[in-house]
Image (cartoon, rainbow, N blue to C red):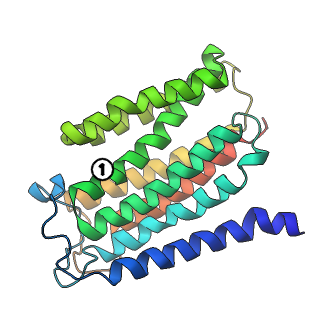
């Protein structure tokens, strides 16, 4: 019983406490704290539907607080890394959990500040997750060792990180390219029986992410938009994305069925 609690309740409690502490720290800042920071590149076009609140240090509250949803699957995955099996092993499971936590904190900071620094950490975490998917897919197809997989995972992130700094306008296309490549390789691996995992988890996670992506596009384009509302499409993207990360983890540790 205590072991089961440590695997579920305690990580979720830790995620909740980190979320509350992050929110308290952000709200304690002066409203003008970000004025001297380099602005996010989206400010030249559109930073999603939610209107920025100039009287608060948290410029986009719904988008910022919903980002913290990633902390919950991230904490659970990290806590269970020691028991990782099937397509994951402890080191890769910890990387997956850490990536989700970085997405949550980075995205919250991004939407609170609308700064270039926040933008970097937001997409950096997303790149960590999708490049790990790609590395794991290639490991399975090419029979890579764990050491080679982790090495290539690190090398994948070097150009992705450089692009975030020097050519940030490519960030969304680069993320989408790596993610789609990883998913296609996973599907090929399943079809060729190179991967003996429960495909339903992958299908469910992919469907959730596809729905989240459609909502993201609708929010960004202003098709479904109420700038002053707490009901934001981009916030829904965060919640669905966090659920998709958990389903992806369940896929990696599943058995064929």
List the residue tagged with mark 1. 120
Question: Of all residues shown, which one is farthest toward the right?
Answer: 1
**Residue 159 in view here:** yes
Give coordinates of residue 158: x percent, y percent.
Answer: 37, 31
Q: Quadrant of residue 251?
A: top right
- Please tell me whether residue 60 is drawn above or below residue 170 in the rendered image: below
Which residue: 47% across, 39% down? 130
Q: Quadrant of residue 231?
A: bottom left
Q: Nearer the viewer, residue 71 or 213?
A: 71
**Horizontally, is 3 left or right of 81 in the view?**
right
Q: Nearer the viewer, residue 129 or 141?
A: 129
Give coordinates of residue 43: x percent, y percent.
Answer: 13, 59
Give coordinates of residue 80: x percent, y percent.
Answer: 73, 53
Give coordinates of residue 169: x percent, y percent.
Answer: 19, 41
Which part of the image, by quadrant, shows the N terminus?
bottom right
The residue carrying pointer 1 sits among few (fewer than 14), some (14 to 19) or many (20 or more) residues within 10 Å by Cα, namely: many
Which residue: 45% across, 60% down? 104
Which part of the image, by quadrant, shows the C terminus?
top right
């Amino acid at each position: 019983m205590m072991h089961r609690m440590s695997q579920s309740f305690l990580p979720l409690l830790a995620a909740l406490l980190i979320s509350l502490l992050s929110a308290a720290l952000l709200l304690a800042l002066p409203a003008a704290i970000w004025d001297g920071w380099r602005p996010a590149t989206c400010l030249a076009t559109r930073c999603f539907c939610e209107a920025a609140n100039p009287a608060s240090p948290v410029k986009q509250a719904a988008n910022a607080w919903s980002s913290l949803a990633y902390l919950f699957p991230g904490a659970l995955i990290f806590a269970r890394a020691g028991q990782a099996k099937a397509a994951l092993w402890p080191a890769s499971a910890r990387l997956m959990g850490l990536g989700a936590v970085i997405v949550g904190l980075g995205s919250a900071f991004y939407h609170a500040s609308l700064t270039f620094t926040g933008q970097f950490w937001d997409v950096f975490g997303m790149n960590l997750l999708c490049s790990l998917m790609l590395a794991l897919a290639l490991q399975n197809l090419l029979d890579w060792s764990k050491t080679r997989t982790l090495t290539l995972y690190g090398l994948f992130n070097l150009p992705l990180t450089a692009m975030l700094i020097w050519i940030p306008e490519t960030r969304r296309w680069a993320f989408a390219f790596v993610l789609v490549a990883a998913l296609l390789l996973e599907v090929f691996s399943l079809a060729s029986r190179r991967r003996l995992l429960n495909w339903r988890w992958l299908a469910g996670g992919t469907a959730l992410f596809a729905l989240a992506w459609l909502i993201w596009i609708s929010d960004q384009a202003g098709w479904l938009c109420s700038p002053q509302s707490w009901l934001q499409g981009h916030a829904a993207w965060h919640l669905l994305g966090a659920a998709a990360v958990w389903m992806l983890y369940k896929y990696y540790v599943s058995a064929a069925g």
